[in-house]
Image (cartoon, rainbow, N blue to C red):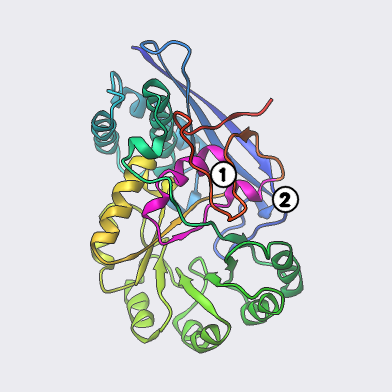
Amino acid sequence: MSLALGHEVLRLALRDPFLIARADHEAGRAATTVVVELRDDRFPGLVGLGEGFPERYFGETVETMVAVFPLLTAAIEGFDPSAAGLRAAGERIASTIRWNGGAKCAVDSALHDLAGKVTGMPVHRLLGLSADIPPTDFSLGLDEPAVVAERAKRAAAFPALKIKVGGAADLATLEAVRGVYDGPIRVDANTGWTPDVARGLVAQLVDLGVELIEQPFPAGRLDWLADLQGGSPLPIVADESCVTIEDLDALVGVTAGVNVKLAKCGGPGPAAQMLARARELGFRTFLGCMVETSVAIAASAATASLADWVDLDGNLLLADDPFGGLTLGEDHRWRLTDAPGLGVERRG
């Protein structure tokens, strides 16, 4: 075999505590992610970097990722580094095992990075996409309203803020943020609301200048989502209800938008296909992330020209990102350059 995949588990401290409604994410103080290195004997001296986030909510752990890596690596043996070859390799990955989006994301990202280095092309160009992408927002986790407002003040230069909600102080938190920030606010309940709570808040969210509501209800309650969207002037965006491209058809007429994440759908290749299909179906597209390093954010940014809204700030939440090379412009757009592959490398 010519392919070899190595992996490293990173436990990274966060700059500020980051809690969401449905999970503690290591008490909101650290994130665990898996970085891989892909080598191919045919291309000596070149290494493809990839990353996958083991999200327990979607059934993944570090252990499950490591268990399926050999299957996924075998599926891409002898891959062709061209755009068409990458699509074919992606189909083989998808048919090898269902779900396991984080593991697939790590391998698919490394595959695209390596192919870019082999061909001398950046990943966005391998995908046939533009380097012109929307700016990213900045996310703030659950906390006391005054604490969230203070963090919002520090992040006031961002063109939009994404506020995690799903607790008793949601309205007070949003009012506190609005007191210090005058830009668009995006609200993410991470399945933490009931229909009564959501209906009771919509009018007030409109008054506060909220731009969208992300995943207010449990993933399987498409009926609740449809009812809320039907009476809401704000777009409802499916996240936990929208994992892979296979979920899109069932959401037509249910929500106005969908959130695509590489760690859910399996990497930059599947994400580009999912975003394009979502647009064909009339959805507004949101490109999100996990709390990840610049490796995963760079892979996500390569697909961002297909997104209406971008939430690629996972590396900005880290106290120390071990990877460099990805630059955030003054306009808060990630800079996609002509550097081959993802354009990132380990610091030091």
Q: Which mark is residue 145?
A: none
Name the residue: 41% across, 73% down.
236
* Left/right of residue 184 with respect to residue 122 in the rendered view: right
- Residue 83 lies in what quarter of the image? top left
SS assignment at label 1 = loop
User: Secondary structure beneath disc 2?
Assistant: loop
Task: Please give the name of the residue rendered at 62% of the width and 34% of the height, measured from the top-left corner.
Answer: 324
Query: Which of marks 1 and 2 precedes in the sequence?
Result: 2
Residue shown at 61%/46% (left/top)? 315
Start-end of magenta stretch? 292-318
106 vs 285, nearest the viewer: 285
193, 43: nearer the viewer: 43
Per the model, the C-alpha gap separating discs 2 and 1 is: 13 Å
Percent x, y for residue 36? 50, 28
The question of residue 278 being in magenta is answered with no
Residue that carries the numbered disc 2 in the rendered image: 15
Asked if one can make out residue 53 in the rendered structure from this viewpoint, the answer is: no
Q: Is residue 211 left or right of residue 82?
A: right
Q: Closer to the camera, 252 or 118? A: 118
Q: Looking at the figure, which quarter contains the N terminus?
A: top left
Q: Amino acid at mark 1?
A: Glu
Quadrant showing the C terminus:
top right
In the image, residue 1 sits, relative to residue 308, either above or below, namely above
- Residue 242 vertical placement versus 67 (above, below): below
For residue 278, which quarter of the picture? bottom left
| Residue type for callout 2 | Arg
User: Percent position (x, y) of residue 269?
Assistant: 33, 40
What residue sits right under mark 1 in the picture? 292
**Does residue 297 show up magenta in the picture?**
yes
Residue 60: % across, % down: 46, 44
- Say left or right for 91 vs 153: left
